[in-house]
């Protein structure tokens, strides 16, 4: 549905987006991750036709944004960074205005406005000017204008930025509810958002794609993938002995103490070659008759992978 090839943007001598290519299918929620200034917004602006690329192509359902801008823009809903809207309009005025621009008329216009208001829960604030709304409601107004014409492709630039945890949860719920029938590309700094809503994550830094995969595959690159946190009751145990016994497990590569106090001994155990070590560690625990307070395996830490990937390029 969305096919990006060799997309590049120069601002003078500075290259903000550097030859990136990727495709997105219907039903996918693609999370665009990257540090500040990575080129996320610039890429989104080129996909939506707000900025002209220096090179490369954007095809949406086979149409080129440069050759058929109106056809492409009809298929796209766009929430720009900060969700700008006209502050002196009410949400209802604003949605009527957007509906007119989108060419909706008569009953269809009324139905789409009603459905959108219900979907993003704007009922309570329809007649209040937008500048008097809370951030959460302003964001909902932004989302409402993006989905008003029921587009097949949604481009959302930091849709949950600046929202409180409840509002974030709500907006993520909305995105998930729309995900099946659309292509959604969203940008975020928030790594938990990727786990919460995205079926795929693209990590971008300095205008280049550094990783592209399902969140689980990215987490698997973490050194915490399949690592185990083990916390034992101290009782009569000696820390040195416990450490040596844990390191004697054939599949355990290294160990990092998390806490060695009068009441607990707690360790992070890292596997050899990313293998699963839970069974071997459990076996050792039973054999030694240790009393376990906590034992769990990790999927991997996206934040660590993100830091690792994005800092390598900064060097
Ligand atoms: N119109 C412009 N003129 C000059 N430089 C620009 C322009 N727009 C963006 N840039 C630069 O391009 C780079 C990428 O910016 P962009 O806004 O795409 O990053 P981003 O990944 O969206 O960052 P953030 O997460 O902070 O929003 C930045 O260094 C920015 O300063």
Image (cartoon, grey):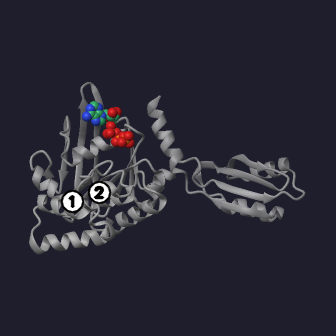
Q: Secondary structure at mark 2?
A: helix
For the residues labelled 2 and 1, say whether their Cβ atoms are less than 8 Å apart.
yes
Nearest to the observer: residue 193 or residue 169: 169
Establish if 95 lies above or below 313: below
x and y, in percent, of residue 223 in the image: 58, 47
Hey, which quadrant is residue 171 in on the image?
bottom left
Q: Residue at x 29, y 27 (%)?
A: 14
- Find disc 2 in the rendering and name its residue: 130
- Mark 2: few/some/many CA within 10 Å (<14, 14-19, 20+): many
x and y, in percent, of residue 44 in the image: 27, 46
Hey, which quadrant is residue 56 in on the image?
top left
Mark sitting earlier along the chain (2/1): 1
Q: Secondary structure at mark 1?
A: helix
- Mark 1: few/some/many CA within 10 Å (<14, 14-19, 20+): many
Total numbered labels = 2
Q: Residue at x 23, y 52 (%)?
A: 86
Q: What is the quadrant of the N terminus in the image?
A: bottom left
x and y, in percent, of residue 94 in the image: 21, 59
- Find disc 1 in the rendering and name its residue: 94
Farthest residue toward the top? Answer: 13
Hey, which quadrant is residue 104 in on the image?
bottom left
Establish if 140 lies above or below 239: below
Nearest to the observer: residue 152 or residue 171: 171
Report the mark closest to the observer, 2 or 1. 2
x and y, in percent, of residue 167 in the image: 43, 61
Measure how far apart labels 2 and 1 are at the Cα level. Answer: 9 Å
Farthest residue toward the right? Answer: 236
């Amino acid at each position: 549905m969305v096919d990006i090839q060799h997309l590049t943007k120069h601002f003078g001598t500075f290259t903000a987006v550097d030859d990136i290519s990727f495709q997105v299918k219907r039903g996918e929620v693609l999370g665009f991750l990257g540090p500040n200034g990575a080129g996320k917004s610039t890429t989104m602006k080129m996909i939506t036709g707000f900025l002209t690329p220096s090179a490369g192509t954007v095809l949406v359902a086979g149409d080129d944004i440069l050759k058929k801008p109106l056809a492409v823009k009809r298929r796209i809903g766009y929430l720009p960074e900060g969700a700008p809207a006209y502050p002196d309009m009410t949400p209802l005025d604003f949605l009527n205005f957007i509906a007119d621009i989108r060419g909706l008329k008569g009953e269809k216009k009324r139905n789409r406005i009603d459905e959108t208001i219900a979907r993003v829960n704007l009922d309570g604030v329809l007649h209040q000017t937008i500048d008097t709304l809370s951030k959460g409601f302003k964001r909902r107004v932004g989302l409402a204008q993006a989905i008003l014409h029921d587009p097949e492709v949604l481009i959302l630039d930091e849709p949950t930025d600046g929202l409180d945890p409840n509002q974030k949860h709500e907006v993520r719920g909305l995105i998930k509810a729309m995900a099946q029938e659309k292509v959604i590309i969203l940008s975020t700094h928030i790594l938990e958002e990727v786990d919460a809503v995205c079926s795929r994550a693209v990590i971008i830094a300095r205008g280049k794609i550094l990783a592209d995969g399902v969140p689980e595959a990215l987490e698997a690159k973490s050194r915490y993938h399949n690592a185990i946190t083990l916390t034992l009751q101290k009782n009569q145990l000696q820390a040195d002995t416990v450490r040596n016994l844990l390191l004697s497990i054939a599949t355990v590569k290294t160990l990092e103490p998390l806490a060695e106090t009068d009441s607990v001994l707690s360790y992070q155990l890292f596997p050899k070659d990313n293998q699963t070590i839970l069974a071997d560690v459990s076996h050792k625990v039973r054999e030694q008759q240790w009393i376990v307070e906590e034992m769990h395996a990790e999927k991997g830490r996206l934040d660590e992978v993100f830091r690792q990937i994005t800092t390598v390029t900064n060097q």
